[in-house]
Amino acid sequence: MVPAEDVRLLQGLTAAGWQLVETRLTYYREQLTAFDHPRFPVRAATVEEAVHIGQIAARVRNPYDRLHADVGFSNARADAYLGQYAQNTVAGKLATVVLVPDVAGLPVDSFVAISDLETDAGALDARLSRVLLTAVGPANRGWHVKLVAETLHRARALGHEAVLMTTQATNHAIFRTCEKLGFRLGATGHVLVCNCL
C-alpha cells in the first residue's frame, strides 16, 4: 500500500515490475455524537453462522478488490480466500463483531464485520471502529447503508471518536453510502504487487 502522494516511489515500483492492483480510498466518519440516522434491526452473527457468512462473501464478487484484480489469483482462489476471511471474522475472532439483518422472514444475505482497533486506539489515544469487510447479496439489496448506519450507532454508543471504512476507487455503491451517512475522504493509496520475482 503506497500513498497516492508518493509519486516517485510509485514510479520506481512500477518501473521495477510492480503492478497496480487496487486504488484504495479510506473514508472516516467523526462527530458521532451528532449522528442521527434511522435505526435498523440488526444482531450479532453467531459462530454457527460463520460458514454462511463466508459463503456470502465468496458469492458476492467484486472484480476490482485487491485479490480479484491480482493476476496472481484466479477468481476461484480469490473467492475462497475472501470466504475464509469472512468466516474467520466470526469464528476466528478477526472482528470484534459481525452484524447481520434481524428482520423476521428476511434471509441473512449480508453482513458487516467491525473491528474496534484496540491496539491502534491505545497508540493514538482515540477509540475507533473500522469496517473490515462488508458483503450484500441480492436477497438483502439496500442493506449496505443500513448495516453501516448501525455500525455508526454502535460506535457512538461505545463512545468512539470515529469509524473508518476502506473501499476501492471503483466502488460507486460505497460512495453513495458514504455520502448518505456523512463520511469524508481521508486518504487515497495504491496497492501494488510484485509478480516479477
Image (cartoon, helix red, strand yellow):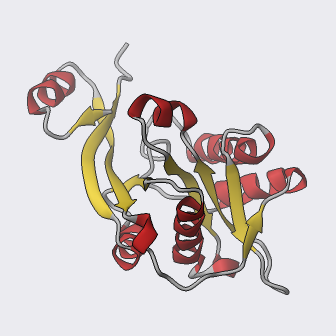
- Residue 16 falls left or right of residue 25: left
- Residue 16 falls left or right of residue 67: left
Front in this rendered view, residue 64 or 119:
119
The image quadrant of residue 10 is: top left
Image height check: is 147 above or below 24?
Answer: below
Q: Residue at (59%, 63%) from the top-left corner?
A: 157
The image quadrant of residue 3 is: top left
Q: Residue at (67%, 39%) from the top-left corner?
A: 94
Q: Residue at (57%, 47%) from the top-left corner?
A: 75
Image height check: is 73 above or below 23?
Answer: above
- Residue 68 falls left or right of residue 100: left
Front in this rendered view, residue 134 or 37:
37
Percent position (x, y) of residue 136? 61, 69
Viewport quadrant of the N terminus:
top left
Most extreme residue toward the right is: 48
Percent position (x, y) of residue 93? 73, 39
- Residue 120 falls left or right of residue 133: left
The image quadrant of residue 153 is: bottom right
Percent position (x, y) of residue 140? 66, 79
Q: Residue at (42%, 36%) from the top-left corner?
A: 125
